[in-house]
Image (cartoon, coloured by chain):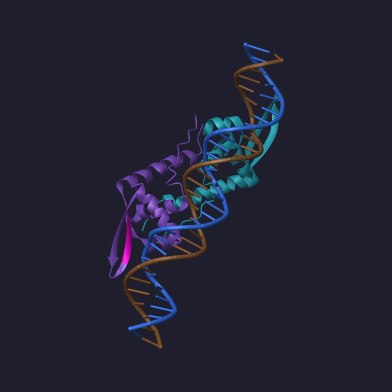
Chain colours: A purple, B cyan, C blue, D brown
Amino acid sequence: MEKVFQPLDPLLHAELRLAVMSLLIADEEAEFPYIKEQTGATAGNLSVQIDKLSSAGYIKVRKTFKGKRPCTLCRITANGQKAFAAYVEALKSYLEVGEK
Amino acid sequence: MEKVFQPLDPLLHAELRLAVMSLLIADEEAEFPYIKEQTGATAGNLSVQIDKLSSAGYIKVRKTFKGKRPCTLCRITANGQKAFAAYVEALKSYLEVGEK
DNA sequence: AACGTTTGGTTTATGTTATAAACTTGTTTA
DNA sequence: TAAACAAGTTTATAACATAAACCAAACGTT
């Protein structure tokens, strides 16, 4: 049996972005500080990576307020969910030890 | 339940190197041109990535001859196998949708 | 009420990394 | 013997991840 490696979506194949998506797959929507805390990322790094996910349409960012403080909400999109599922599927071609 | 993301070994978290390791997990030893063909990588890229895996002690490279032609053999090491297993384990913290 | 501190981020700079392009060395084939 | 091919290596470039520096508003303190 031929082993075929499926290409890995470079947008998802990055530790922090993958972590963010993983959180949003589980929770659907989350606030910036929560994501920051859960991932252990710096705010700057997180901000950049969220931008990329947002530009790709994998997540949707909503700026609101919580009382008087700004509050950035991130929500995964349908496309994001699809992309994540496809990424997981593609990964399997690398991880499953191919049987004869 | 708290979600904790385990760090991903940067040496393995790279498409081509992961593919190489995946092949060697399955076959243990393989020739350079075979790996090249299976992964679809360019020779240059493959050469560089094999060097890195070799420097890390994840694989062992043996230069021999096949008739008169040079032949580069790659074999996974025990450390490489361990690292691969650990990487797969770490990945799970990103892929498994954490249950409450 | 003014001053420092904290919160919630964004922008910019830097160092790494992946990758391809160009090159080398030797072998086969016409 | 000259051209084409095989098997890689070295070098250059472009993208990327990440942290450091920065900014603005709100809060707490004196």
Residue B64 placed where, x, y %?
Answer: 70, 31
Residue A42 visible to the viewer: yes
Residue D13 placed where, x, y %?
Answer: 53, 41
Magenta: main secondary structure? strand
Residue B97 visible to the viewer: no
Q: Nearer the viewer, residue B6 or C15?
A: C15
> For this view, does B49 lie left or right of residue C1?
right
Q: Residue at x 46, y 50 (%)?
A: B92
Give residue B28's quadrant in the image: top right
> For this view, does C22 lie left or right of residue A4?
right
Q: Which residues lie in the magenta part? A: A70-75
Residue A31 belongs to the span the image colors magenta: no
Residue A66 placed where, x, y %?
Answer: 29, 67
Q: Residue at x 29, y 70 (%)?
A: A68
Residue A74 belongs to the span the image colors magenta: yes
Give residue D3's quadrant in the image: top right
Q: Nearer the viewer, residue A51 or A9?
A: A51
> For this view, does B80 lie left or right of residue A24?
right
Q: Residue at x 34, y 59 (%)?
A: A30
Report the label total: 0
Q: Nearer the viewer, residue B40 or C9?
A: C9
Residue B19 placed where, x, y %?
Answer: 53, 39
Q: Residue at x 63, y 45 (%)?
A: B78
Give residue A33's quadrant in the image: bottom left
